[in-house]
Amino acid sequence: MILSKRIIDFEKRPGIPSILWMETLAVLLAFLISIFSGRYRVELIELFSIFTFSSDDAELQILFWLVRLPRSVLVLTAGAALALAGTVYQSVFRNPLVSPDILGVSSGASLGAVLSILLWHNTGGIAQLASFCGGILAVVLAMGIVRASRNDSTLGFILGGVMISSVASSLVMLFKYFADPYRQLPAIEFWMMGGFYNADWEKVLNILPVCCLAAISIFLLRWQLKVLTLGDDEARSLGVRVKLVRGILVIAATALVAAAVSVAGLVSWVGLVAPNIVRMITGDTSSKSLAASLGVGAVILLLSDTLARSITASEIPISVITSFIGAPFLGYLLWKAGHAL
Amino acid sequence: MMKEWNSKDQGNLKINNLTIRFFGRPILENLSFEIEKGKLGIVLGPNGVGKSSLLKAIAGLIGAERGEVYINGLPASRMNQKEQARLVSYLPQGHPIAYNYSVQDFVLMGRTPYLGVFGVPGIKDLQIAFEALRYLGIPDMAKRGYLSLSSGERQMVLLARSLVQGAGIMVMDEPTTYLDYQRQYYFMEKLKKMIKKYGYTAIVSLHDPGLALKFADKMILLFDKKKLAEIDCQSKDYLSKFDACMKVMYGPQVDVRKVGNDAAVLWNSDK
């Protein structure tokens, strides 16, 4: 009896559920801030009439349903996706300073978008699809290089990613050189700077199924992911099919990043910073870090997006904000790591 | 409850004519030996002789060029990763852990071979983990972060993980390397008690011949890509045999002497 009571004590992980509740609250708050801030003032009192479609202000109705809400939902989805992908990448590569870009997904996505702008003069749906495919393709190629070189260590993956990234970046540069400087070049630059200024429900619907599918696969494989962080040999000796599981996880995480990048362009730092914030909050001992990373990523991106469109009269690229927050935070992490030694 | 992680299968380990190559370069050639159930086998040999490769081959982490590892009489090359993980546990030599999991989660990872690919350990696995921690006298550590533990505590946690893995054969690559003098003996004592109690078989590589002499049931001595000798520590002349092997492996300075009921390994600089 004493034993069973102690086991129950053992099972309880105080703090973790409450962290998830607090996070849900934070996400809700950030979401509300995001919806209510902007050029056009929306009062809290009007929320009810907006939701019941009984507002007198038709313009407000349209603004809320077709501009604000889809944008906030898209930002939330992208933030959660980037953070989850970051957590997976950092676990798979056993390094807390890895960002989801490491296997070339961002450069691949950029190349896809640039090609679509050059070939089809399109910055809408086709660019979105092309950048999504470009991102996935880059990572598949990087993994192919690793396979061909028969060096499937972490270093091998990182080198494969560096190769693909640099080839894709130089192709982007080449295409920019040949692009029409008055129409195409600005479109390319604009895409690369990233932002949610043209968010709509179509974009939300385009990425939501992919994100859900990828997130569910990652959650289903959460224990295998955890064991994978012990290193290849140990994971295999515990019965994990390392290559298969790692392959699925990397592809799922890549799909998340590619989806986010395809609707928002390059959004830097969130994937790197959010998982580290989660580790700081949960003290690293939690098995709920995947769920927690969703909330942290969503909050970071919602607040960054709100800042990006409210600190100046015209909107500034969101990466400017995330970089200003992210880069010093990385410095802090390095400082902390240095002091821990 | 103990039965849950008590290996039902026998833990007989047999190596038959094993040849391991690394990118065509021979590491070990024509190695054969057997360790019976419940015995502690210790692998000794100079740096780079292939101890780690041998242990990895037993754990199914690297393939053999020729020959076969038999686990409970069954060829390991026909087992899949999961089947082998239920029969053989493996502790690598000094493993860098990137993330600070709780000891509880860390020990629970030993239950992975019994979970489906989408599975997560349940309350039963937790009870097993807790039992193992209690058996090793460290239940209070359950909530602590693995990275906050000392080397000695970490080895105990790894021992607990091997225990909950329930594999009849435990493979450990230099588990005592980072331990102080006392903890090296403490670790080996715990390990030996544990395998006696649960009928496990262990194969452990070490560097310290004194430690090996104290605990081994059988010693496998590797030298120059081959098995130099296989010494049964119950045999009468095992000390003189061990002495001769040590001199071949490490030079004439090594002297193994009988001291009362024990034996000591000495180093004579004069020779």
Image (cartoon, coloured by chain):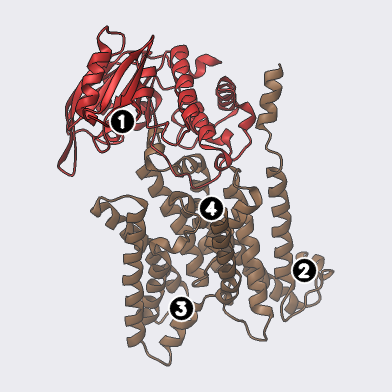
Q: Which residue is rendered at x = 45% and y = 53% of the image?
A: A252
Residue contact at pointers 4 and 2, CB within 8 angstroms: no
Q: B189 left or right of A14?
A: left
Q: Nearer the viewer, residue A81 or A128?
A: A81
Spatial separation of the CA atoms under disc 4 and disc 1: 32 Å
Q: Are marks 4 and 1 on the same chain?
A: no
Q: Which residue carries the number 1 mark? A: B55
Q: Which residue is mark 4?
A: A341
Give whichever of A210, A223 is nearer the camera.
Answer: A223
Residue B63 in the image: above or below residue A137? above
- The nearer-to-camera label among 3 and 1 is 1
The answer as to whether the residues below labels 2 and 1 share one chain is no
Q: The disc numbered 2 marks a residue on which chain?
A: A
Say which element carries label 4. Answer: loop
Give the Cα distance between marks 4 and 2.
Answer: 55 Å
> In this rendering, which labeled residue sits more in front, label 2 or label 3?
3
- Marks 3,4: beta carbons within 8 A: no
Residue type highlighted by circle 2:
Ile
Mark 4: few/some/many CA within 10 Å (<14, 14-19, 20+): few
Q: Quick one: SS at disc 1?
A: helix
- Confirm whether residue B106 shows in the render: yes
Amino acid type at mark 4: Leu
Depth-wise, is mark 3 or mark 4 nearer the camera? 4
Residue type for callout 1: Leu
Q: Quadrant of residue A195?
A: bottom right
Q: Which residue is mark 2?
A: A50
How far separated are the C-alphas under marks 2 and 1?
Answer: 68 Å
Q: Which mark is residue A123?
A: 3
Mark sitting on residue A160 = none
Chain letter for brown?
A
